Image (spheres, helix red, strand yellow):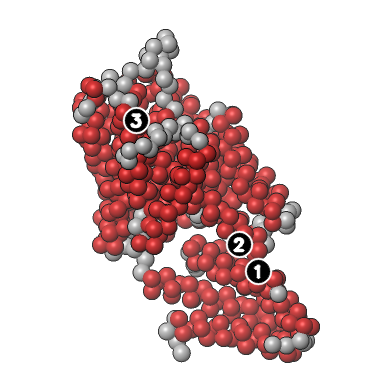
């Protein structure tokens, strides 16, 4: 970054493009990359240089945390086997395949080809989450691709460190040491992430100050990341585990107004960071290309070959795995359609960019690391290719596959849950009326409101001003009933009657009503 003006320009550019993408229903990451490339090719635009610290320390933690918070712990447990296979086996195989292709078709020596393979081996959680957020995928498929991208960091990071040590120091590979390093990175990161989540949960249970709650929420991912990196474990894994644990139980930690404020603040932060970081990917590629030597003029074909290799390898793993899992579940129908979507959702993005930028400049003997510029160009080019090709075509593929959740199905599940929740509140109100614990006029007013909501829910399912004292009594009674409705909503989720998406939507509706009552 050359100046504050450049940063402001990036923010304005990214915000305008991302807003247009939402308006036109175009994947924002893909459009942002294209816009960044277009701007970088304009005359007079200064070269953009991104440091790994900017990506790894400033951008990644909040984006990873926001992605992890969206994952339901219950649904994550249901897909842990395929996630493990993909997060370990597919990453290793992808790194080997890319390394072999790069060694055969590029000027890279075997050691640097392996570095490129390690950089590009894992899918990117930021890109996958950003692309999949609006696709209405079934919860199991959405959690599968999202969890895979979140939990494959430890594997790819170990591979990257091994590859860099070979390229820089020309040392031999000790796979026993690499296995121990993997256990330290993954296990240590998970333990530290769980510890941070526990500490934050204790603090938030004792805090009702909105500003303090917001600060805690913003600091949490950075705390998990910095502590894990200081302990030489995986900061990404720590942030992911912390986010999953707090996201699954966060609705029990705070009040409705604070949840709404946190949702608004984090939504703004995620929007800005995602917009800027995907623009940076496009903006930096021309600068990296200028650093290439004249002998590396074949990089476009080489990057395309690497990208095709990654896509092919992923299909070769995902299709058999999907067929095997569906056969065990006794439901083979639709397995190929699910596999097609899951295999095409393996985009690369921010994490490979940060890894490639952290490749050392020199070898252990002080000489310049050969072909580093080519590795950066190939890695960034593959990221751009996957974001554009897979990003722009993933939504049409989901629609043609027929696995996307129909709006009618989503509305019906939400209406059923709404009917059960409001009915629980109405039963509680009748108990209060029998005990004469509230003025009859207040009870009757709230009874009409709840019955109206019940009728509205039934219609969606296809079935057929007072004085200040009264208003205050109404607000207090309605808040009491909302607490009962919230408890019933949690019960429905705990017994697996509704999905996490439905729970979040109805919880937000109840939070909004409770917040309006509190303002009154």
Q: Residue at label 3? A: 288
Q: Which mark is residue 515?
A: 1
* Sequence-first disc among 1 and 3: 3
**Is the C terminus in the top left, top right, bottom left or bottom right quadrant?**
bottom right
* Residue that appears at 69% across and 87% down: 465
Q: Nearer the viewer, residue 481 or 112?
A: 112
Q: Is residue 123 visible?
A: no
Q: Residue furthest front?
A: 44
Percent coordinates x, y for residue 192 in the rendering: 60, 37
SS type, badge 3: helix
Q: Nearer the viewer, residue 207 or 75?
A: 207
Q: Is residue 252 above or below residue 383?
A: below
Percent coordinates x, y for residue 220 in the rendering: 61, 44
Q: Is residue 219 above or below residue 488?
A: above
> Mark 1 or mark 3, which is nearer to you?
3
> Mark 2 or mark 3, which is nearer to you?
3
Q: Which mark is residue 260?
A: 2
Question: Pointers 2 and 1 in contact (CB under 8 A)?
Answer: yes
SS type, badge 2: helix
Residue 427 is left or right of residue 185, and the answer is right
User: Disc 2 to disc 3, how far (Cα)?
Assistant: 42 Å
User: Disc 1 to disc 3, how far (Cα)?
Assistant: 50 Å
Percent coordinates x, y for residue 320 in the rendering: 27, 47
* Sequence-first disc among 2 and 3: 2
Tag 3: Cα neighbours inside 10 Å, few (<14), some, or many (≥20)?
many
Question: Pointers 1 and 3 in contact (CB under 8 A)?
Answer: no
Tag 2: Cα neighbours inside 10 Å, few (<14), some, or many (≥20)?
some
Q: Is residue 299 visible?
A: yes
Q: Is residue 112 above or below residue 492?
A: above
Percent coordinates x, y for residue 516 in the rendering: 65, 72
């Amino acid at each position: 970054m050359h100046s504050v003006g450049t940063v402001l320009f990036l923010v304005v550019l990214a915000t305008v493009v991302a807003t247009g993408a939402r308006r036109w229903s175009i994947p924002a990451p893909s459009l942002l990359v294209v816009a960044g490339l277009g701007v970088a090719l304009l005359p007079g635009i200064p070269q953009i240089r991104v440091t790994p610290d900017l990506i790894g320390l400033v951008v990644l933690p909040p984006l990873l945390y926001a992605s992890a918070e969206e994952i339901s712990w219950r649904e994550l447990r249901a897909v842990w086997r395929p996630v493990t296979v993909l997060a370990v086996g597919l990453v290793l195989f992808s790194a080997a395949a890319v390394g072999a292709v790069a060694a055969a078709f590029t000027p890279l020596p075997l050691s640097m080809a392996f570095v490129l393979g390690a950089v590009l081996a894992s899918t990117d959680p930021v890109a996958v989450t950003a692309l999949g957020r609006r696709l209405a995928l079934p919860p199991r498929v959405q959690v599968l691709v999202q969890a895979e991208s979140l939990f494959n960091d430890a594997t790819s990071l170990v591979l990257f460190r091994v590859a860099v040590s070979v390229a820089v120091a020309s040392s031999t590979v000790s796979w026993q040491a690499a296995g121990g390093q993997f256990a330290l990175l993954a296990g240590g990161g998970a333990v530290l992430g769980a510890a941070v989540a526990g500490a934050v949960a204790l603090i938030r249970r004792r805090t009702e100050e909105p500003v303090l709650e917001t600060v805690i929420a913003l600091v949490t991912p950075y705390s998990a990341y910095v502590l894990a990196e200081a302990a030489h474990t995986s900061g990404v894994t720590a942030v992911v585990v912390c986010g999953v644990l707090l996201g699954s139980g966060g609705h029990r930690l705070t009040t409705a107004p604070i949840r709404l404020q946190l949702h608004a603040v984090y939504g703004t932060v995620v929007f800005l960071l995602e917009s800027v970081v995907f623009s940076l990917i496009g903006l930096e590629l021309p600068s990296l290309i200028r650093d290439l030597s004249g002998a590396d003029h074949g990089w476009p074909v080489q990057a395309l070959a690497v990208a095709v290799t990654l896509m092919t390898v992923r299909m070769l793993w995902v299709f058999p795995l999907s067929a095997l899992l569906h056969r065990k579940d006794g439901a083979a129908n639709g397995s190929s359609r699910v596999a097609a979507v899951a295999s095409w959702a393996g985009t690369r993005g921010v994490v490979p960019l940060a890894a490639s930028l952290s490749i050392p400049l020199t070898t252990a003997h002080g000489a310049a690391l050969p072909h580093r510029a080519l590795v950066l160009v190939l890695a960034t080019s593959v990221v751009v290719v996957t974001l554009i090709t897979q990003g722009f075509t993933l939504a049409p593929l989901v629609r043609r596959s027929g696995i996307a959740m129909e709006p009618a199905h989503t509305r019906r599940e939400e209406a059923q849950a709404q009917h059960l929740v409001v009915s629980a509140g109405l039963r509680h109100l009748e108990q209060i009326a029998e005990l004469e614990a509230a003025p009859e006029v207040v009870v009757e007013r709230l009874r009409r409101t709840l019955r109206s909501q019940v009728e509205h829910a039934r219609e969606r399912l296809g079935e057929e001003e007072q004085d200040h004292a009264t208003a205050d009594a109404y607000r207090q009674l309605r808040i009491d009933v909302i607490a009962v409705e919230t408890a019933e909503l949690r019960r429905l989720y705990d017994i697996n009657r509704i999905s996490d998406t439905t729970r979040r939507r109805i919880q937000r509706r109840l939070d909004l009503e409770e917040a309006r009552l509190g303002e009154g």
